[in-house]
Image (spheres, helix red, strand yellow):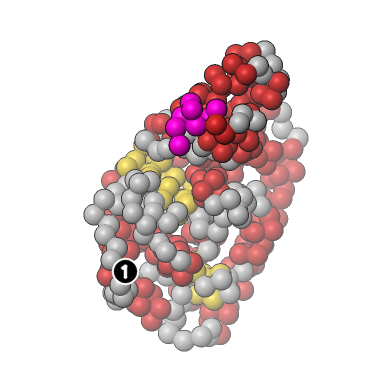
Amino acid sequence: MQNAQVNDINASQALQAGLAGDLTPSQQLCISIITFINHRCRLIGQMTIEMNARLSYHDKETVCQNIFNEMGEVYHGCTPENHPIIIKNNEEFKTACTLMAICRLRYPKVIILTFELMNNHLHLVAAGSQETILMMFAEYKALLEKYFLHEEDSGIELNEFKLKLHKITDLENLRNVIAYVNRNGSVIDENHSPYSYPWGANRFYFNTEAAERHNTPQKFLRIKECRALTHSRKYDGIGAIPLVDGYASPFHFCDISTGEKIFRDARHYFYKISKNIESYEEIARMIGENIFYTDNDMFQIACIISRKEHNCNSPHLLSRDGKIKLAKILHYDYNATLKQVQRMLKIDVMTLKSLFGE
């Protein structure tokens, strides 16, 4: 189940004896080996896609179910979303991603299917024992604390930065959780989509262009760079950590391939991250998060409720009383802001303020 890219990195460790300077001939050779093996894996992957296209719906579901059954324990981990800001800029995001890669190599029995970093919390979907995943996170938290301790005027406190694990018990739950995590950053940052948010594994799912760009690392993390990040020498022999755009690429330390195989195909995945709104609410409530919907999501919800409650395909066509009833549902049950409700239902501002206050 281990991602081919991760295996390739481990196989190349013997070639990474000295990472103290710029690329040496052995490092160039290592890059060539990784590129060759990943190219081979892409060809095999293309053959798999072509074969998969000939399978029936039932056969695809059977393949997905078998992969899930072979995973063993799988967990959705999340830290509190109301934590104070931790990561303040892109350089700190890059550091946080690279530290995640270091911890992943320290705990090879943990398979990260996807993760996403926000500026005050993270989401993680991983296979492995609960104990090992928590040990990996504890080391990750300790490295973050040490990093920020050496940053001037950081003032970062991570006492409440704790990972809570929720066991994933079936295939459909895993699909919904991966979709929930992979769209999380883009819901918070309206300038990104699940295919572009940079601080996680999300953008590599069914995105050939991103995968090909990150397939060949630009360089490797040098020993002195690793020491500067971790303020420790114990990670000197951890192995090769490929860098793209100045940080560890999730493409190389997450098992994207297995994560993709949980879905029947790219179209199925796209439906999950763009249309399957009800599951997001269910997951958010289970892990105690407030869920925020984009305008597109909110309009889909409004249309669903209009059809179900009023037999009307468009919320714009509802009566005034129908719109007010729907406004209350959107605001109280789906955390719609007053401006969102106004845009969705075209209710005047004074009416909304009389209903919900300022």
Q: Is residue 354 magenta?
A: yes
The percent position of residue 288, horizontal first and vertical second, equals 37, 35
Q: Is residue 45 magenta?
A: no
Q: Which residue is mark 1?
A: 154
Q: Is residue 116 above or below residue 347?
A: below
Q: Residue furthest left?
A: 159
Secondary-structure class at tag 1: loop
Residue sitting at x 58%, y 78%: 29
Which secondary structure type mostly characterizes the magenta part of the structure?
Answer: helix
Q: Is residue 246 above or below residue 349?
A: below
What range is drawn magenta here? 351-358
Report the side of 156 relative to 218 (left or right): left
Residue sitting at x 38%, y 46%: 81
**Residue situated in front as seen by the camera: 32 or 328:** 328
Which corner quadrant holds the C terminus? top left
Residue sitting at x 56%, y 69%: 244
Amino acid carrying label 1: it is Ser
